[in-house]
Image (tube, rainbow, N blue to C red):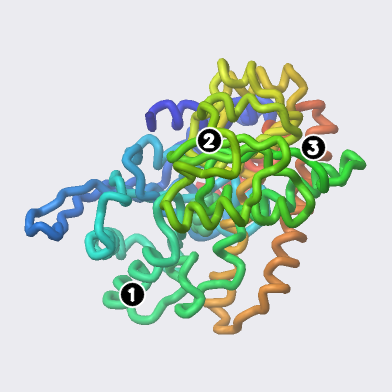
Amino acid sequence: MGAEALEHANRYFEWAARELELPQEAWVQLLTPYREVRVELNIRMDDGKTGTFIGYRVQHDNSRGPFKGGIRYHPQVDSDEVRALAQLMTWKTALVGIPFGGAKGGIQVDAARLSVAERERLTRALVDKIHDIVGDHTDIPGPDMGTGPREMAWFFDQYAKYHGHRPGVVTGKPVALGGSLGRISATGRGCVELLEALFNRLGESLSGKRVVIQGFGNVGSWAARFLAERGCKIVGISDLGGAYFNSDGIDIAHALEHVERAGSLRGFDGGEPIEAEALLGLDCDVLLPAAVGGVITKEIAKTIRARFVIEGANGPTTPEADEILHERGIQVVPDILANAGGVTVSYFEWVQNLQHFYWEEEQINKELRRILWQAFDRVWEEAKRRRCSLRLAAYVLAIGKVWEATKWRGV
Ligand code: GLU
């Protein structure tokens, strides 16, 4: 699984490196991670037995600032997947212009099968093993799939036992511990801002658009709320519990209530149940994949009927599928732009932590909008100038920036 994700990330890099005519030495320097750590995590399980898990932290690049990136708890986590995701973070932070490099971490675990106490011991065990290589000016973890404010709070607390009160060592914390207002909803909000910027460029309105969302976790559910608020019709949603279609638009508040009660969309009565793959081929204006990577394969790409794809997830589209979508005139807002809202508000959280001065939510949302609209405009103009896809334009801009910083720093 992870090997494919890494191969795909490298391929996207290669397309941009060729477009930029980067020398071979740049390819090697930019692709080679700075540091990779793999750790054994032994914890006491609730039944008294010892559970052994493997944790990872890959620090990809820090030429523009401290390493930054989330920590994922998922059964598919492996060293190659974390390498791929760390690389994406380097391009993402460069593209939106926040002063961080890229990193990613994770634990190979099905967190849903652990008790809260086991998740706490596992998170603290990870900090015990990696606290020496993270820090508020070296490497700043944050949330990702399977983690959230709860895990970030334990991370912060365990780190404090070694290094004292350093809230800036991790972002995505609860507001009560120095987390930022607006962080929870930031990735979903960011997707919606970018869609608004896109339709604005096309002289169209976001209101009235029909949207299909794959994944109803943090990113998908917040995007759904904001899209519904802006007058969109969410005609399809899905999660591990099932996929549902409703041509009149799904009542998002009702879907949220259902998930709150039932733990997933399984048994949802606000739409017609359909096959998971059929969801991706629904007739709509916008398809928003907001689940795992690698879901839009070349076979699926041929069935997509959306006009636009906006990648809430990291790496949802394979390079072969990307080429097919491009040939078919379906524009893709790539992950390093589409889901950059999360790390952008993580940046605001870090700034607030370092300054011990906290902003109002209104200011956070305003700054988020400014950063994302500017990044969108740069990508749009670059794509026009080079007559290329938004993905290639985004990668060209991001990789160009990182290479420039690397060159200035020297060996
Ligand atoms: N996991 C998020 C991403 O993939 C960002 C994590 C962070 O805020 O550092 O962009």
- Nearer the camera: disc 3 or disc 2: 2
**Amino acid type at image mark 1:** Asp
Nearer to us in this view, 178 or 84: 178
x, y percentage for residue 12?
58, 29
Q: Residue at x 43, y 26 (%)?
A: 4
Residue bearing the label numbered 3: 382
Q: If you read the primary sequence from the N terminus, does the residue marked by circle 1 or circle 3 appear first?
A: 1
- Compared to residue 185, the image places residue 335 above or below, namely above
Nearer to us in this view, 103 or 227: 227
- Nearer the camera: disc 1 or disc 3: 1
**Amino acid type at image mark 2:** Ala
**Amino acid type at image mark 3:** Glu
Q: Element under label 1?
A: helix
Q: Crowding at label 2, few (<14), some or many (≥20) Cα neighbours within 10 Å?
A: many
Q: Which mark is residue 157?
A: 1
Q: If you read the primary sequence from the N terminus, does the residue marked by circle 3 or circle 2 appear first?
A: 2
Q: Hey, which residue is sitting farthest front in the picture? A: 269
| In this rendering, position of residue 376 left or right of residue 60 | right
Note whether residue 346 is visible. no
Q: If you read the primary sequence from the N terminus, does the residue marked by circle 2 or circle 1 appear first?
A: 1
Residue bearing the label numbered 2: 243
Q: Which mark is residue 57?
A: none
| In this rendering, position of residue 114 left or right of residue 71 | left
Cβ at disc 3 under 8 Å from ligand 1: no
Quadrant, the N terminus:
top left
CA distance for labels 2 and 1:
38 Å
